[in-house]
Amino acid sequence: MATETLPSGFSIQNVLTFFLLINIDLLHCQQFTIPFKAPTECGVEEFFDISSLSCVKCGPNQLRSTTGLTCVCKTGYRSVTTDKASNTCQQCPTDKPAVTKDGFGCIRCPGSLSDDGMCLCPPANVLVERDVSGNLLDEAKCETCSRNIPAFSVPSSSGDRCERCQASFINTSCVCNTPNVLAGGLCFPPGILPTNANPSVNYGQLKFSVQSAWFVKNLYSSAAACLVFSNLTACQALGNMCVMNMHSFSGTSNDACGLFNTIFRSKAVMSSTQDISYWRANLPWLYYGDEPGLAGRVLQTDPVPVGFSFRGKNKNTEIKLLAAVYNIRGEFLKWEQIGGGNLQLCPDTAAKQAAAYSFGTAYQQSCDLSVAELLQAHSEPLFYDVFMDLGGGENRKLLPLPTLVYNQQYNGRFINQESMKNWYLSRRMFLVDTLGGREKSMSSLPKVIRVATSVKIRFQLVPRTQEGQIFPPLMIVTYTDVLITDINTQTVSTMFAMEYEMDQGEARIKTDTALGVMGGLAVLYSLLKTVSWKRRIGSPLIDAGTMFKFLLFYSGDLANVFFVVTVGTGLYWLIFYKAQQFVSVLLPLPAQEEQFVTYIGCAFTLKAIQFLHKLILQVSVDIFLIDWERPRNKASRTVQAAGEPKRDPAPVSIWRTYFVANEWNEIQTFRKISPTFQIMAVLFILEVVGFSNLALRDPWSTLQRSSQAYTPSYSLILRYSLAATLWLCIGLLQVIFFTVFYEHFVEDKIRQFVDLCSISNISVLLLSHRCFGYYIHGRSVHGHADTNMEEMNNNLKREAESLCGQRGLLPNTDIQTFQVSLTTHLRSQYERIREPLSRRNGPSRLMDTSTNNPFEQNFRAYHTMNHFLGSIVDHAHPDMDYIVKDKLMFERVIGMEFLEPNEKSIFYNDDAHSFSDVLFYGNEATLLIFDTLFFCVVDLGSQSFVLAAVLTYVQQMIFRLIRNFLGRKNLVNKTLVKVQIPLRSTVCLCPVQPCL
């Protein structure tokens, strides 16, 4: 055989690769499809093959079975097995036309045939087709079951044997003859219970009842079997039907709960179960007593003999709950440990669901569930009797959990929605009932389903306990009736929660007492401020304006009271709850926090009023810059007068005044803290470091939490106290750093401004009230400030070497800042000088027509005011003279002057530079508290520290711009210097009109 070799470089591997590349598209594009067939689409002589998912034709003489998944022989044909995998059908002979029940034999019948070709026997007879050895008889027999003594037998449910009849029939025979009552396969004597039992399930939320198929079948029989035979399962089934009816009582006694209570009262002479008087023998425990006030005694009298501790050797935070589980038929299923999803309808991870049973963790889980899923997963309700496991080793004890069914009715009243004294506590609950709302049959779609949409287990701490003791926990269940319309689109919202509470009465009393006492002190302090204000404006009358001013002062002081009390209260909860070992403090519930949040809202509103009040005062303060500079010679300028040149003194430069005004404008919004650093630091600590986790409603102080762990909701009290405390602490640290270090070693803008006034030979008069204000004495000790650099340096050097006088107002003193209390006469003169300008800004009919040039009028008023105030400082007016003195310590503390300036004005020495009170710098406490409250209020409303930080920063910038704009405008108007004050060190002259 000849062989050929492949070309060089061409191998078998290359051939295979080439082949795969050619066919790769075919591999990718190949699709597999099959026709869709449903079992109902198969023909009469076809069955649905579950392997091929298609319809397959049956064999000869075969038809589709009732399930549609197999084939059966036609009527009159018997099965003949040919091998292990298949069978055929053979027609029975005419002498044996009937087919045996097993389908494999043919037989003669003693009577007639059924429609399916099998023998029929009369009632009370059984069909016998084989002898005792299993051999097939030639002819079937119909044997009569003896219903009399001693046999008491009836045909079995399959009809192939006789069996002893039910015990309730065994009185005379197996027939329940009148007047006996046949119900649920049992025979009851007459008159034991009303035969007209009401098999309805009442849906109070929908305001209608449903004739339940389950109740129709089982209500009377369960009640009668429980009463007559003390059948334990029947008693449990009756109790379950009462629970399905919300434990409700009505005027009639023939519904489920009415029948249960009839039996309960009939067993009063019998002993109780477990020494519990509400738990009668053979009956389930469904109710506590109906005595008024019993709920309070059950829930708040005897502590549970178990203590909880968050830390230490005896740490105990595990809540152990156990449930006895019953099915709808009253059969006991098991003891089940509560945990995971048995009481929680919402799906979640096991770790998160387990967090519900850690004491102190406020757990809440909610979700929306599909009605279709509920119908599929809960075809029958399960019933739970919940207990708290107290432990005890061999002597293990269980504490029953009282249940409060929110939907329970008592003669039409929802008694459990009223006060505790009217509560009717019960036992046993279920989660989903899809059975009670089925009307026609138990296999039909329910008209209504009932879902436990809210399950809460509430723990109440024993007052003043130091060992973590609690009262018996209370389970609160709220059901929702869902009318079925479209199961595929309908959803139900469900929630499971664990709540912890303590008596907040004592804490509330202490808070209200603190507010009352401090609020009373605030009234006195506000009255003192009002009296001081009246003195400073020089008005002795008490009028509406006085009352309004008092309210403004009181709003600020009351805001401080609310702020101190809320922050103090929040810190108390934060520290004592998070740091406790044995449980002695529990957080208020969200509903109990509403009053606290109201106090925060009051604090913010009142503080905002105070802030706006101070802002308005600052942008309306009277200010004048007194220029002490005088011309050095009188022949330095030539002016034209009446057509002839005239020599006039050289003018004094205005640039020094502009410069001082510019620096004043710059420090108007200067603060002791950096708002940007403040916000970034607070946000970093809360969100990055993880301090926000301290506000979670659990007892743990860990800053970092796993994403897989359950995260409880935030406590508004803890969240507020944490945010407010951090904001205040960082703010105070900034103030301390600024005051102790920055102002001493970097720059002190307030003192620098005073020094600038001295160098510029400019004094500043600030009047925050009509007759009260501040004076900065900036008169140069060198006589002149409008000089060259060399002379300026020489002057400063002489001053540093103490070769000249001191800068103080009085000789040989350094005090340059004063609080001034003016006489009304001096204030009147001040206003008289400004009057022409006020007329110019007022109606045209009040304007002085003698002067048409506003700039000239402004120029004249400026020089007149400058000369007047300079002469006042120089004691040139005996009738408007002043004295200089120190303030008493008490005067400084209360902020009021005892002496009234009747004849002479009073200049109080002020080393503290109190003129900063008309700046942001001197109101740092108000600004800090306002920012704190703004940040906290936004956070409480949005539950977002980031959003609160952003809005706080925006708020700060807005008010800073407003303060700068209005303050600059006021500075231009009040100093009579018509100039646009620049942002830094440049100025823009506006010779005629203000630039603002």
Image (spheres, rainbow, N blue to C red):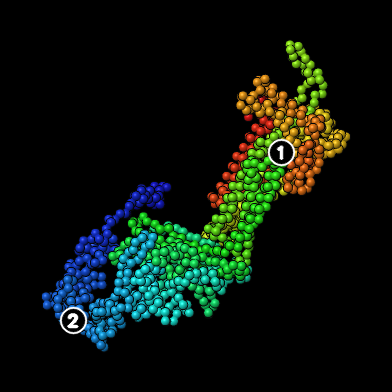
Residue at screen point 59% across, 50% down: 602
Residue 738's place in the image compared with 409, above or below, is above
Residue highlighted by disc 1 = 538
Residue at screen point 49% across, 62% down: 497
| Marks 2 & 1, CB-CB < 8 Å contact | no
Give the quarter of the image for residue 148: bottom left
Mark in front: 2 vs 1: 1
Residue 734's place in the image compared with 126, above or below, is above
Give the quarter of the image for residue 793: top right
Residue at screen point 21% across, 80% down: 124
Which numbered circle lies on residue 714? none
Q: Position of residue 906 (x, y in %)?
A: 78, 39
Q: Amino acid at mark 1?
A: Gly
Which numbered circle lies on residue 142? 2
Quarter of the image containing the N terminus?
Answer: bottom left
In this view, the residue farthest toward the left is 94
Q: Provide the secondary structure element on which disc 1 rests.
A: loop
Q: Position of residue 406 (x, y in %)?
A: 44, 64
Left or right of residue 49, residue 981 in this image: right
